[in-house]
Amino acid sequence: MSGNIFCITLAVSGRSICRNCNKYIEKKTLRIGKDIPNPCDDNDEGWGDVTLWYHPACMFKEFDQEKAKERKIKAPEDLFGFKELKQGEKDTILGFINDANMKREDNSLCQFRSLCTRISEEKSGAGKTAVVSDYLKNGNSGTGFKGDVHMLMKWLLPGVVKTSFNLDDKLLVKLFSQIFGTNQKAMEEDLDQGDVSRTVKVCFEKSKNVTPLKESMVSLREINGLLTSLSQSTTEEGMLKMLSKIIKRCTSDDLMMVVRVIKHDLGINAKEKHLLNGLHPNAYQAFQISEDLKHVVKRVQANTLESMPGLKEKKTGNGDSDDSDSMDDLKKTPVKRPAGDEGLTTSAKKSKPECKTAPAASPSNVSANIFTGCKIFLPENTDSFKELKQYIIDFDGEVLSEASKRSATHIVSSKGKMSTASGKVKVVTPDWLWHSIKKKQLASTEEYKP
Ligand SMILES: [Zn+2]
């Protein structure tokens, strides 16, 4: 069978059972066989292979669940018996193969890295949004993104959808130096130049103990699984084991990206807002409300994001858009833009003077970034909670949940109820919010202490 482990034939009897869906494969319909070493041959006595049977569609579904290194049907030549099929059958199988290949590409760490490069090359927020949006629309092949959208967005937002690792730079260097067989001191010195992910990459390439893969082949899902196990390791021994597993699946560039994910910083210089809005113009707002990325992705895919409770309707039609980085701006933004003004979009710059002369703020007719950089904890029992929350989000602020209260810059507390917060955090009354919204600039917190 010239090294092929896959074959395709018509089912002779109708008695074989598909290993994926556990249903019988009908007589005289196509089935794909996969040869595996006989699992009963414990002593390696050369019992030969056994064939597992699948419905063709089920076979390709199975590939999605398998590790990247498992053998797969990537071309018709991988499938013994393909040439004997009728033309219509060939077309069906070729369709499966093409789809699977595109899916694999769109789910790969390799393509994710190149997406990150494209995002980081865009200077403006709107430009970054456009890159994400374009990728989700077209995928790597240009014919549509076939990968797992939630997984991709999760990878793009390691600082937001956080997996915590018990690893700081020092421990990373210590563990990697053991795996690479590199002098820990030398690695630490290299680290002094700033970027642990680069240090790890360089030392991986020079390592005598381990060799980076030449070609990137791992999927986001597979590394994600390994990272989850890594995050659950509490001992150095456990972490060492997981990092060694990860390394075996990586090129040196792959590993650099993995370290960046562990550090919760992809180095692409993009705000979560700009990345999320590549998914949908309202995705950032929706995420702020639900704090559940999976839920937001589900709604986007089901086309029900607009009807999410608490989501303010956005006009995406013409000029009166309320958000400097919204659809309108996007439409005018080609994916490739010449390097331009750091951070600011053209429309954000233009809109600023307009804001000063605009009538009383209302989220539907004004674009202002009153609360930029503010992380505000707003207790749910505050009067007009929903409305205030919406205003804060509309005006570029962040509303924190009870759980993340500790990273707040401002804590809203109604009169009489003194918060126990200390340090740099400012405790303010709801009136501080109302006043800031009305004046379209941050009011002095001194005047609004509870
Ligand atoms: Zn099946």
Image: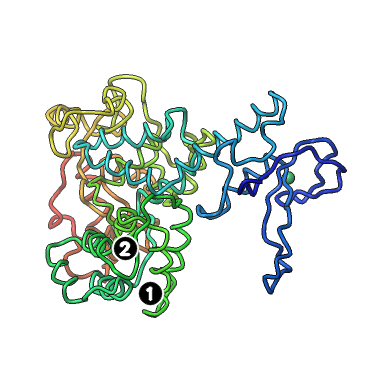
- Residue 130 numbered tag: none
Can residue 378 be seen in the rendering of this structure? no
**Do callouts 2 and 1 mark residues in contact (Cβ within 8 Å)?**
no
Residue name at image x 32 percent, y 42 percent: 114
Question: Mark 2 near ligand 1 (CB under 8 Å)?
Answer: no
The one of 134 and 101 positioned closer to us in this rendering: 101
Could you say which quadrant of the image residue 73 lies in?
Answer: top right
Judge the density around disc 1: few (<14), some (14-19), many (≥20) Cα neighbours within 10 Å.
some
Is 34 left, or right, of 410 in this rendering? right
- Distance, label 2 to label 1, CA atoms, is 33 Å
The one of 336 and 133 positioned closer to us in this rendering: 336
The one of 49 and 109 positioned closer to us in this rendering: 49
Horizontal and vertical percent for residue 109? 39, 49
Regarding mark 2 in the picture, which secondary structure is present there?
A: helix
Q: Quadrant of ligand 1?
A: top right
Can residue 109 be seen in the rendering of this structure? yes
**Which mark lies nearer to you, 2 or 1?**
1
Is 393 left, or right, of 184 in this rendering? right
Judge whether 410 appears above or below 288 on screen. below
- Residue 240 numbered tag: 1
Residue name at image x 12 percent, y 57 percent: 446
The one of 23 and 289 positioned closer to us in this rendering: 23
| Three-letter amino acid code of the residue under disc 2 | Lys
Judge whether 333 appears above or below 209 on screen. above
Q: Which residue carries the number 2 mark?
A: 405
Is 436 left, or right, of 379 in this rendering? left
